[in-house]
């Protein structure tokens, strides 16, 4: 079997001559092209064009694996992929920030159209209306889901969107302290800390639900559902507490849950962020995803990221352009609201196609299926000897179960039975597993999970 | 004003009652436990479309776009090269696309092998000691690398607060320095395009022990290889500061020179430029960083390590933490890995040679018609000034828009800011000589038109889906949603 290790240790050839011996499909110049072009340039050889590089450092040895033909490449990648044990042939109960959902067949072929896939940032609007209008539609869809006034074109992912939201709150309030619930995804909390550290801003991770804010706090950031899947009825109270302290209320939401649950705008959110992956984007081992970022209209000029606006061309035809660019790094440089200059556009497009296909009834149906199946699974697992589901708070499609043995052991045994178990959260809560159930899980899978767990007790 | 519409929005196409996809009925009994009514929403104002409506809508929108797949796209500093379809096919295989980021390492050895291999290959290509794939974009890579430098300096008891940036730099450089809490000092290039060593010396002496790093793009944003780069690195290091390389222009250096050999301590790499990840209309990309050994302990989480033949995710001992929820933009990393494997060392070298030859060929063919910002051998991109055409009444913007009428995407314009009427052309290695010749012929024709019919340029484009758009009104009265 070909593995990366074996291939990578294959010795490479020494420095190349003018051109590789074999014509490569990615490099169309032929020997006669080169000769003609060098004559026009007035250079004796291509090497002459690199004369500005200090001679002692020219043409270093490159220890890389030998080139592969397309067929060999596909075979090598297939061999590597065979070392992954993924959800396609297994039941999967893992969530924790990345979710398996049904992706309608129309999403991928539309997103992968070359005109979308291989275009650049739409700085030339006359020949980029496709990208620009899809961004406008994405912004509109994010507003519809979250209930907010405005949204940007997208952030790197949900975690960095949350970090940027907290930094924006600091810019809006002139304060340099961030309060975050300790039930935000721990990885997201780490990202918030990293972004804040750069700017010398303090982060307080407060015990969930006990949010005592001071006049120093720029915002209170919570997750709804929280990391353990719980949906709280107290969110409105937290929003009032934030506002009473003069802070912004930032909510990290799950977009599928918004098919069923109230929009964060309805309980006082000033900024809403979300990980968009659950809307038609493959798991892809953690990325690329897209962060959704929406806020109240009064913060428009402090928003990070790209924004598209509607306008008209010289003949009065409706069109779209990148707008409010004076916030951005390519104009404002060190005074920009952020250094971000990507919007994960292709992934944002996938979420827009996905939502267009689902419509309001489809999204609600997906959310309801998640809810029903997760609650069916929770009831089944709670009934097993040795297991207890933590059910003191309402939950959406994830829940915590106490296990009789270390979750890592259970997960290894589940994998032997073709089941990808839940997330081992023993580092946070002893002998606890965080399970996720979506519309992708059949009743038979859930029953098989219960049977397996019973045997493993 | 009667508004004409190229394509209605999803909401305008919506018709209550339509659906685009079917979903199953629930196969489990309805739970007796109902969500509290107070938590439920009563309206969800999403569009309702038939499946064919959705397909046609997005297909028609795509046809309003220009792209690498449809047009030559000589956008300077953006490296709009071939995006091989085989890489997309690999990224779409379920073995990778369906891998969950929270699966135990033992179940995702294939994905981790790819990441480990890419870490090593990028370090080898750049001549650096360690690599992190965590940054989700070039700008985030910059931020990560600057935070790594900051953490390293603090670990040795140095509290430095200034970063020196050439004023020809990408806007992300100063914006990043600011996000990382640094003050920015700008230095100007000298007339031949290389960095002004006296200005650098003055900046280093004035700000002396507060300078943390020099952020420099190599080749520079002027498309030139700075002939004093080794001397610059020596000066920066003599002041106890570090060399940061913006890797946006790495496409010129593959197998030609390793930044690590020139004294760079850290750099970021745009996988969506040099390593062929499709730009997607504005992402996703990825911005891995490579660093010298002394900075390695400070890299972000997670880092892929190999222990006893098995791969695992690890946290560097003094790392700056996470940049995103998971491990980086894996789908992008996978494409870059496949790209490097398909080329090998000789292929990568040939990429840079062809990219540089193509740019010099365009320079040679257009030299008489457009003013060169710097008349010397360029690297992978060539920088013109449209000042001669401006004198005839057609600005660089007008030249760019006229190019659309000839079927070429405009190049990068008005960047770098230090060059008047800048027009930066990066042909990449992907174009044939025939395409380059047709492109140069069109540019020569546009130069003639600028002299004889400048109004033709000022009113361009004439052949695009839309004419020029009113950006001022868009910013003054923002309409940001339906």
Image (tube, rainbow, N blue to C red):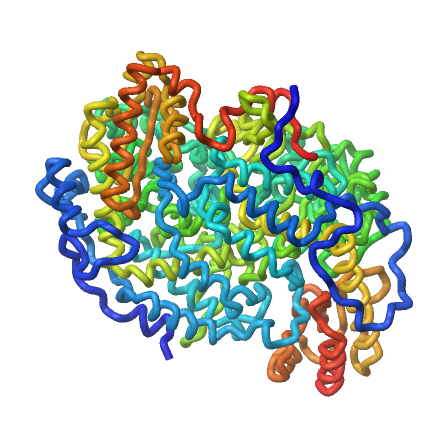
Q: Is residue A229 left or right of residue B174?
A: right
For the point 37% across and 52% down, the residue is B275
Q: Which quadrant, please, contains the C terminus of chain A?
A: bottom right
As drawn, the residue found furthest toward the left would be A44
Q: Is residue A49 left or right of residue A226?
A: left
- Number of labels in the image equals 0
Residue A300, x across and y down, in percent: 65, 29
For the point 47% across and 62% down, the residue is B91
Residue A378, x across and y down, in percent: 80, 71
As drawn, the residue found furthest toward the bottom would be A455
Residue B149, x across and y down, in percent: 42, 44
Q: For this rendering, which residue is in front, A173 or A333?
A: A333
Q: In this view, does B477 lie to the left or right of A214?
A: left
Q: For this rendering, which residue is in front, A133 or B80?
A: A133
Q: For this rendering, which residue is in front, A43 or A385?
A: A43
Q: In which quarter of the image is residue A358?
A: bottom right
Q: Quadrant of residue B228?
A: top left
Note whether residue A57 is visible: yes
Note whether residue B164 is visible: no
Position above or below: B456 against B58: above
Position above or below: B413 against A29: above
For the point 67% across and 54% down, the residue is B51
Residue A424, x across and y down, in percent: 66, 70
Q: Which quadrant, please, contains the N terminus of chain A?
A: bottom left
């Amino acid at each position: 079997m070909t593995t990366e290790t074996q291939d990578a240790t294959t010795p490479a050839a020494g420095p190349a001559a003018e051109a590789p011996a074999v014509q490569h499909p990615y490099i169309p110049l032929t020997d006669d092209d080169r000769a003609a072009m060098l004559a026009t340039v007035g250079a004796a050889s291509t090497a002459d064009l690199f004369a500005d590089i200090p001679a002692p450092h020219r043409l270093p040895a490159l220890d890389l694996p030998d080139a592969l033909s397309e067929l060999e490449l596909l075979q090598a990648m297939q061999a590597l992929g065979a070392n992954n044990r993924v959800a396609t042939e297994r039941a999967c109960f893992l969530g924790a920030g990345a979710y398996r959902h049904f992706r309608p067949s129309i999403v991928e072929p539309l997103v992968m159209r070359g005109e979308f896939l291989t275009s650049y940032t739409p700085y030339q609007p006359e020949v980029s209306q496709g990208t620009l209008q899809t961004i406008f539609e994405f912004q509109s869809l994010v507003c519809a889901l979250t209930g907010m006034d405005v949204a940007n074109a997208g952030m790197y992912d949900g975690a960095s969107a949350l970090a940027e939201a907290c930094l924006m709150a600091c810019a809006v309030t002139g304060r340099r302290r961030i309060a975050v619930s300790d039930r935000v995804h721990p990885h997201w909390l780490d990202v918030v800390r990293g972004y804040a550290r750069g700017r010398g801003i303090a982060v307080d991770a407060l015990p969930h639900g006990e949010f005592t804010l001071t006049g120093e706090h720029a915002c209170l950031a919570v997750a709804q559902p929280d990391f353990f899947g719980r949906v709280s009825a107290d969110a409105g109270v937290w929003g009032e507490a934030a506002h009473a302290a003069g802070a912004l209320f930032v909510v990290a939401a799950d977009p599928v849950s918004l098919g069923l649950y109230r929009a964060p705008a309805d309980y006082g959110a000033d900024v809403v962020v979300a990980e968009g992956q659950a809307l038609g984007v493959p798991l892809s081992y953690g990325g690329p995803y897209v962060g959704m970022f929406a806020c109240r209209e009064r913060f428009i000029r402090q928003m990070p990221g790209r924004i598209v606006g509607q306008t008209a061309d010289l003949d009065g035809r409706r069109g779209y352009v990148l707008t409010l660019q004076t916030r951005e790094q390519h104009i404002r440089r060190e005074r920009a609201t952020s250094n971000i200059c990507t919007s994960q556009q292709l992934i944002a497009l996938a979420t827009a196609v996905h939502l267009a296909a689902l419509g309001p009834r489809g999204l609600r149906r997906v959310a309801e299926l998640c809810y029903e199946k997760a609650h069916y699974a929770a009831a089944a697992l709670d009934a097993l000897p040795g297991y207890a589901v933590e059910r003191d708070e309402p939950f959406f499609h994830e829940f915590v179960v106490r296990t009789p043995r270390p979750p890592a052991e259970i997960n290894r045994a589940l994998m032997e039975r073709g089941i990808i178990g839940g997330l081992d959260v023993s580092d946070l809560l002893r002998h606890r597993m965080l399970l996720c159930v979506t519309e992708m899980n059949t009743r038979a899978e859930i029953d098989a999970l219960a049977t397996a767990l019973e045997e493993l007790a | 004003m009667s508004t004409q519409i190229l394509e209605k929005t999803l909401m305008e196409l919506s018709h209550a009652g339509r659906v685009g996809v079917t979903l199953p009925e629930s196969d489990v009994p309805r739970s007796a436990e109902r969500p509290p009514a107070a938590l439920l929403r009563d309206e969800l104002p999403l569009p309702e479309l038939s499946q064919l409506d959705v397909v046609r809508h997005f297909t028609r929108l795509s046809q309003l776009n220009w792209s690498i797949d449809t047009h030559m796209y000589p956008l300077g500093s953006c490296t709009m090269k071939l995006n091989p379809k085989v890489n997309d096919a690999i990224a779409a295989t379920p073995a990778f696309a369906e891998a969950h980021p929270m699966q135990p390492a033992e179940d995702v050895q294939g994905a981790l092998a790819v990441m480990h291999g890419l870490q090593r290959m990028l370090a080898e290509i750049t001549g650096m000691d360690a690599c992190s794939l965590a940054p989700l974009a070039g700008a985030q890579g910059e931020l990560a690398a600057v935070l790594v430098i900051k953490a390293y300096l603090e670990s040795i008891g140095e509290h430095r607060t200034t970063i020196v940036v050439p004023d020809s730099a990408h806007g992300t450089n100063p914006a990043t320095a600011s996000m990382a809490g640094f003050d920015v000092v700008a230095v100007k290039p000298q007339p031949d395009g290389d960095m002004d060593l006296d200005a650098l010396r003055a900046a280093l002496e004035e700000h002396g022990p507060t300078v943390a790093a020099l952020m420099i793009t190599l080749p520079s944003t002027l498309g030139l290889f700075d002939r004093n780069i080794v001397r610059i690195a020596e000066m920066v290091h003599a002041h106890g500061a570090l060399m940061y390389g913006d890797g946006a222009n790495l496409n010129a250096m593959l197998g030609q020179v390793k930044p690590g050999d020139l004294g760079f301590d850290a750099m970021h790499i745009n996988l969506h430029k040099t390593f062929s990840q499709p730009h997607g209309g504005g992402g996703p990309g990825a911005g891995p960083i490579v660093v010298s050994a002394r900075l390695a302990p400070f890299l972000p989480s997670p880092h892929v390590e190999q222990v006893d033949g098995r791969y695992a995710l690890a946290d560097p001992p003094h790392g700056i933490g996470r940049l995103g929820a998971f491990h980086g933009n894996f789908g992008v990393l996978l494409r870059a890995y496949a790209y490097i494997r398909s080329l090998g060392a000789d292929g990568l070298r040939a990429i840079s040679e062809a990219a540089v030859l193509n740019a010099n060929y365009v320079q040679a063919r257009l030299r008489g018609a457009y003013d060169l910002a710097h008349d010397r051998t360029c690297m992978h991109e060539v920088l013109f000034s449209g000042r001669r055409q401006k004198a005839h009444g057609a600005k660089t913007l007008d030249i760019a828009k006229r190019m659309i009428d000839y079927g070429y995407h405009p190049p990068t314009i008005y960047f770098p800011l230090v060059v008047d009427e800048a027009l930066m052309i990066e042909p990449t290695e992907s174009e044939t000589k025939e395409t380059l010749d047709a492109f140069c012929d069109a540019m020569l024709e546009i130069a003639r038109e600028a002299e004889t019919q400048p109004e033709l340029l000022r009113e361009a484009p004439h052949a695009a889906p839309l004419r020029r758009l009113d950006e001022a009104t868009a910013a003054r009265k923002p309409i940001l949603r339906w």
